[in-house]
Image: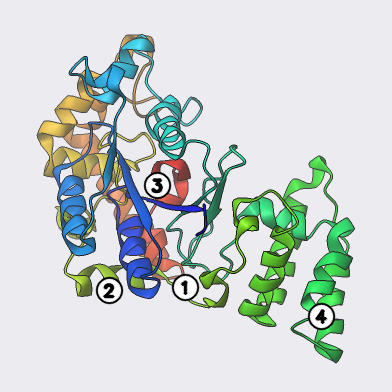
Amino acid sequence: MSKLEHVLGISGGKDSAALAIYLKGKYPSFNFKYYFTDTGKELDETYQLIDNLESYLGIQVNRLEDEKITSTNEDPFDFHFKSFRGYLPSPQARWCTALMKLKPFEKFVGGNPTVSYVGIRGDEQREGYISREKNIQSIFPFRRNMWSQDVLEKIFTPENQEQLLSYYSQYLKGSKLDKVEAIFSKPISFNRNYRLEKERIIKEKLDDLLDFGVAEYNRSVFQYLKTTDYPLSIEDDYPLLENEDNLVRADIFKILEESGVGVPAYYKKVKYEVDGQVGEYARSRSGCYFCFFQQKIEWVWLLEQHPEKFKEAMKYENAEELFTWIQNESLTELMQPARVREIKLDHLKRTNKHKSKDSKFLLDILDDTESDACTACFI
């Protein structure tokens, strides 16, 4: 029996819940361990989703707790907020992520070789969380490329070209193998000063390889991993190697609705009116209701749909010390009627602008800003 453990974090959001349902249905032989890192500052819909998911899966989701914090009867966020003496977390200082998400997760995993499954979709332009712990490996089943960025950098390192080609030669022959060799041979620099150029070329190489066959690509990468110390190196085989699915936003909602688990209410658009115009807003993410990555229209949504939570968020601000959730603007300022009107009009303007563009990522541009957030909040 394999010593490898398989874990899946339930954030309370749509993608992680859909991933749990998807994997349960497609790979029932896996013994997944599910976990949830509670900040104590979630909306009620988050907990309802987890309850629904437990009923569907027939298994309990582990609520990760810190005994030291639990003994104080404080929420995890309040406990850490005090220790930081009123400094709010921000994009530049994400102590909330480090202390309330990553630390409990890595303690939960311990030192066991572990694969962590992450619900980043095939239509998202972002990379997922990659643990610094060598015993934890991230896999992204919703994407054509399920491997993490650190794996990609290794397989496209010029020194590894011959090794990867030898694996590919087991699945492709003749002109196809010649074309794969040409893909690997395309010049690439790992100079730190050319990071964006390196990432662009890696993406081009990746797309070209996937076009020659996802399964052939996965099996070649898997054989390479067996020469490393990645957790999957201890496996003789891996069922996801044959998976060629590429799930997008519409697929996620379909999975949730058809399973009966349901879509959290905060994703459902609510109409608003401003100056005779009608727009729609919703929350784009799970997690803390005062997440500093929220768009301003989401703060307006919170103000109008959950005014009690908005007031709670206000209590943490100290405008005199410039400790505000939004840079250069306090929630007291944002909630003023004239400012709310301005934010809604700006949202309408941007929405109408995007509607005029022919973009396959339109739904995400309008409705889903998780790509702006810290991916570790959604592991």
Q: Tag 1's secondary structure?
A: loop
Residue under the image location 17 percent in, 26 percent down: 312
The residue identified by callout 4 is 169
Q: Tag 4's secondary structure?
A: loop
Residue under the image location 36 percent in, 17 percent down: 323
Would residue 365 be found to the left or right of residue 213 on screen?
Answer: left
User: Mark 3 vs mark 2: which is more N-terminal?
Assistant: 2
Q: Tag 3's secondary structure?
A: helix
Mark 1, mark 4: which one is toward the viewer?
4
Q: Is residue 274 visible?
A: no
Q: Is residue 65 above or below residue 305?
A: above
User: Mark 1 vs mark 3: which is more N-terminal?
Assistant: 1
User: Mark 4 vs mark 2: which is more N-terminal?
Assistant: 4
Per the rendering, the mark at residue 378 is: 3
* Residue at the limit of the structure toward the front, as seen here: 1
Disc 1 + disc 2, Cβ < 8 Å: no
Q: Is residue 265 above or below residue 96?
A: below
Q: Which residue occupies the foreground of this view, 270 or 177?
A: 177
